[in-house]
Image: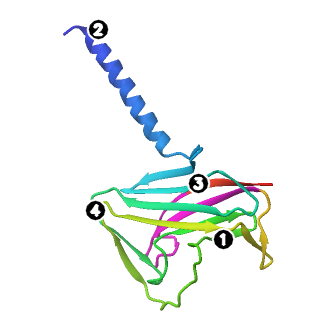
Amino acid sequence: MNSRVVIGALWIGLIAIGFVVGVYSLWLIESKSDEGISNRVLRDGLAFEIRADKARFARGEIVSISAMLRNVGYRQIVYYRATPCDPDFDIILRSPYGDIPLFERNYSKPICIQVISERILEPGEVISRDVAWDQTIWIFEKPVNAPPGRYQIEAVFVIGALGIPEPSSERLSVSIWIEIIP
């Protein structure tokens, strides 16, 4: 075989590998478009994604957030939550004024017995949550409208003995940044 053909084939192979790696790397970083903003991570057989319908919101506008956790691996994922009523993963607004857990629209916390709940995520199974933030934050225990600025929204999935963050817990998180404009 001609050495030029072999070298040419190697270069084409390297270019193809570079393209695949580049596309895969883009999949793991935050992306913005007219359809919204999203971010994804892939780790240990789990794909975790969070998205908002846009990156900038007018003051007082409802911020709708969707998050999805998919088992893309070949084994079951066993995890625990502190009660049967707790969601499978948390969605948290991080602000300079403190962290605020976000919930589904018209959510009211049910009365629930404190018992550790074992849950299983089968291969190919998807868990999703859709939450809304009305741009209310709490300052000195009083609700106020969030001032203009950038806010981080993070989805957090914890695999731990109690389903709560602890030193021995495995934690997978993904976040996006949104902006409230005047």
In magenta, the rendered stretch is 149-174
Location of mark 3 (residue)? 53
CA separation in Å, label 2 and label 4: 45 Å
N-terminal of the two: label 2 or label 4? 2
Query: Disc 1 or disc 4, which is closer to the eye?
Result: 1
Q: Position of residue 84 (x, y in %)?
A: 44, 83
Location of mark 4 (residue)? 75
Q: Is mark 1 on a helix, strand or loop?
A: strand
Q: Is residue 159 magenta?
A: yes
N-terminal of the two: label 2 or label 1? 2
CA separation in Å, label 3 and label 4: 32 Å
Residue type, mark 2 in image = Arg
Residue type, mark 4 in image = Arg
Location of mark 1 (residue)? 100
CA separation in Å, label 2 and label 1: 62 Å
Location of mark 2 (residue)? 4
What secondary structure prevails in the magenta region?
strand
The structure residue drawn at horizontal position 78% and vertical position 68%, both measured from the top left corner, is 145
Q: Where is residue 149 in the image (x, y as percent from the top left)?
A: 76, 55
